[in-house]
Amino acid sequence: MRLPLTTAATGGLALYLLVLWRGLRIVTVARDGDESWTDAVLAVQPGHEPTLAYLSTRARLRGDRSRAVALARRGLHEHPESVLLWFNLGAALAADGELAAAESALQAAIDAQPGFLFAHFWLGSVQQQSGQADASLRTRVQALAEAERQGFLLGAAQLPAEARQ
């Protein structure tokens, strides 16, 4: 089975995704701004985690927070361990002003993958918005320490001498 393939792409570039179809073969899908391919993927695998995560993110970025929340929850029903779906749920709930629920979802993302920096930083932001300044500071400091541990930040000993003064 071959899913619809869009060849015209904005700026001449297309994003190619590989989708495993029922564990039998790999199907190539392309996207260039329209999301019609997602219907084809979900028709074959209604709970396809990467597609639901993608759609949830796109809905949130377009301001359709209720759809973003619904898609993330749909995915979490089948993939309760999904870091991206927990993160998307938390981000969408935060954007909707549901800070307590957002905090829980972001914490679930962190629990599933402690090194997922985006969830730490979003959690710190949600805590700040909900008036938990001390918790927010603690979360953000821990996130910075984790970022340094992962090599994204330079420790003082790694900085050039003129920067340490």
Image (cartoon, rainbow, N blue to C red):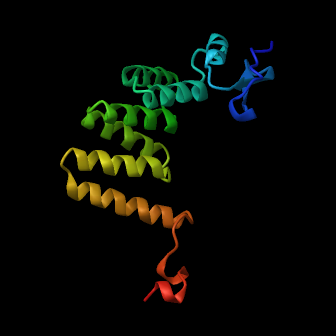
16 displayed left or right of 85: right
Instruction: Provide residue 123's location: percent of width, then percent of height.
Output: 35, 47
Taking the spot 51% from the left edge, 68% from the top edge, the residue there is: 153
The answer to whether residue 81 shows anywhere in this view is: no
Instruction: Provide residue 113's location: percent of width, then percent of height.
Output: 50, 47
Q: Quadrant of the N terminus?
A: top right
Q: In terms of depth relative to the viewer, which is nearer, 49 or 3? A: 3
Q: Quadrant of the C terminus?
A: bottom left
79 displayed left or right of 48: left
The answer to whether residue 72 shows anywhere in this view is: yes
Taking the spot 29% from the left edge, 33% from the top edge, the residue there is: 101
Q: How many marks?
A: 0
Taking the spot 33% from the left edge, 56% from the top edge, the residue there is: 139
Q: Quadrant of residue 142?
A: bottom left
Q: Quadrant of residue 126?
A: top left
100 displayed left or right of 8: left
